Image (cartoon, grey):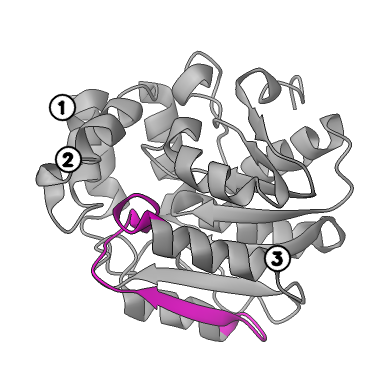
Amino acid sequence: MDDPLALAPSTLRFGRGTPVMLLHGFCGGADSWQPTAAHLSRRHEVIVPDWPGYGDSHALAPCATIEAMAARVIALADAMALDRFHVLGHSMSGFVVLELLLRHPQRIGKAVLYGACLAMHGGGRFESAADTLARIEHDGVEATARHVVATWFVDGAGHPAFAPSAATGSRMSGRAAQAAMAACRDVDYSGRLDTVRSPTLVIAGERDRTAPPETTLRLARALPGSSLCVLPDCAHAAHLERAGLFNQVVADFFSGP
């Protein structure tokens, strides 16, 4: 792997306490976590990186696989001298959290999988990974980001958070967008999670079109001893649609026994 500190220049840090790392998904960025980071920083040190190829790291070469993304997280934790940390992964980064739970269980305290699933194929996503790849190729990143981000909200492009979220998504590089879809397309964690022992919380939006509640339920059932929370009246971006409720659920989980 190249420079393990490559994530560090665009990483935001807030607060003090038990470390919590927030990992954004496809079309996301570190800036979208600001309300959640501010809430969690009352009790935690909150670390919020951009993935290579996204946000302020858009010029960096993207990770080609979920395994490489998990390795980046561990490299960043090592660079920050974090022996053990909590982690929250949204959407695509849910796969990264599962990889961390399997490969680095001693490094993970508690884990939140939000808008996540066991596999992208057959998971009920609003369109297939192949369709999104074709859209990136044909329409470009900005149009693809607007199309994808509109599905994050019950009110679609009418939600106040749509425009800033679409702007964040448009900052990912074409290489990063293609690499993310290719990395997620064939990943499947079905039947692989029996050994997970870290406390886990699975969060679903009631009207999520990327990871519908039935797919997150299957994920929760596959994780031994996990908890499931379905948030009402929101889709794939509950941290923006129902920020107060989302932040309280996550904070209670990370701060609880």
Magenta range is 222-243
Q: Residue furthest top?
A: 59
Give the secondary structure at mark 3.
Answer: helix
**Mark before the other along the chain sequence, 3 or 2:** 2
Quadrant location, the N terminus: top right
Give the image location of residue 60, x and y in percent: 55, 17
What residue does disc 2 label? Answer: 147
- The first of marks 2 and 1 along the sequence is 1
Residue that badge 1 annotates: 139
Q: Name the residue under label 3.
A: 255
Choose between 79 and 138: the one closer to the eye: 79
- Report whether 194 appears left or right of 17: left
Circle 2 — which element? helix
Q: Which of marks 2 and 1 is in front?
A: 2
Q: Looking at the image, which residue is at 62% across and 57% down?
A: 97
Q: What is the three-letter code of the residue carrying label 3?
A: Ser
Separation of residues labelled 3 and 1 (CA atoms)? 43 Å
Q: How far apart are marks 2 and 1 (CA)?
A: 10 Å
